[in-house]
Every structure is written in structure tokens, then in C-alpha cells.
């Protein structure tokens, strides 16, 4: 037996329907899920843009590189110039990606 047995038909004007469809697409949810979240008063967030997801991935990658360099520097008590150059290069890539979003 289904958990949700009641179906509701709602009549909308063309402009209301268009706005509803836009909001559903922006949320990345199915229309049923979107409507249930509205009813339960849960916050509905827009799906992040692909560029933001890629930037977050770059930040994570840069964090891993920084941690690796920090571990090497702590273990060896040395910090090679090539490590500094790699870190600066990663930083410049991150800044360039962020500027594309602005």
C-alpha cells in the first residue's frame, strides 16, 4: 500500500505554472518532492551551478596539496622551492576559476 494515498489537482494560470516549473528546475528536485518540501516548510535551495561545484572541487584539491606540502615540511623541516611554486600555481588556478564566476 502506498504511503501517500491522496492526490490533489491544482489549477494554475499559465504564468503561475511557468513560475512553478522554473522553481522546480532551479531546485533540481522532482515536482512532487518540491511541493512536499513547500508544505512541510523545509528550506528549498537552488541547485548549485556546475561552475560552483567545479570550483569547490578545485578548493578541495588545493587543500589536499597544501596538507601534503605541510606534512613534508614538518617531517623534513625543509620546504623546497618547487613546492612553493606548485602551491602558488594551484592558488593562481583557484583565483582564475573564482574570477570566472564573478
Image (cartoon, rainbow, N blue to C red):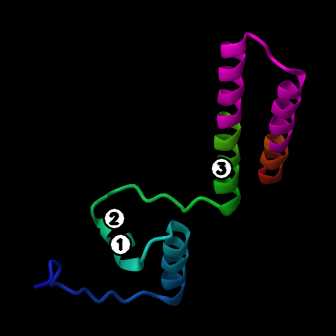
- Please, what is the dominant secondary structure of the magenta stretch? helix
> Which residue occupies 67% across, 54% down?
52
Query: Relative to the observer, which residue lies in front, 9 or 46?
Result: 46
> Which residue occupies 49% across, 81% down?
16
User: Residue 33: which numbered mark, if any?
Assistant: 1
For the residues bearing labels 1 and 2, Cβ distance under 8 angstroms: yes
For the residues bearing labels 2 and 3, Cβ distance under 8 angstroms: no
Tell me which label, 2 or 3, sits earlier in the chain: 2
For the residues bearing labels 1 and 3, Cβ distance under 8 angstroms: no
Q: How far across and how far down the image is residue 65, in percent?
A: 70, 34
Query: Which SS class for mark 2?
Result: helix
Query: Which SS class for mark 3?
Result: helix
Which residue is label 3 attached to?
A: 57
Residue 82 in magenta stretch: yes
Q: Which span of residues is magenta-colored?
A: 64-93
Q: State whether residue 34 is above or below residue 1.
A: above
Q: Quadrant of residue 42?
A: bottom left
Q: Which residue lies most toward the top here?
A: 77
Which residue is label 2 attached to?
A: 37
Amino acid at each position: 500500500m502506498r504511503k501517500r494515498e491522496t492526490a490533489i489537482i491544482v489549477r494554475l494560470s499559465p504564468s503561475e505554472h511557468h513560475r512553478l516549473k522554473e522553481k522546480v528546475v532551479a531546485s533540481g528536485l522532482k515536482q512532487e518532492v518540491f511541493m512536499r518540501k513547500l508544505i512541510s516548510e523545509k528550506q528549498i535551495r537552488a541547485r548549485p551551478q556546475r561552475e560552483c561545484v567545479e570550483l569547490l572541487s578545485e578548493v578541495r584539491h588545493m587543500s589536499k596539496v597544501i596538507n601534503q606540502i605541510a606534512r613534508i615540511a614538518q617531517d623534513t623541516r625543509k620546504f623546497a622551492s618547487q613546492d612553493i611554486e606548485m602551491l602558488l600555481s594551484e592558488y593562481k588556478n583557484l583565483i582564475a576559476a573564482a574570477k570566472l564566476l564573478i
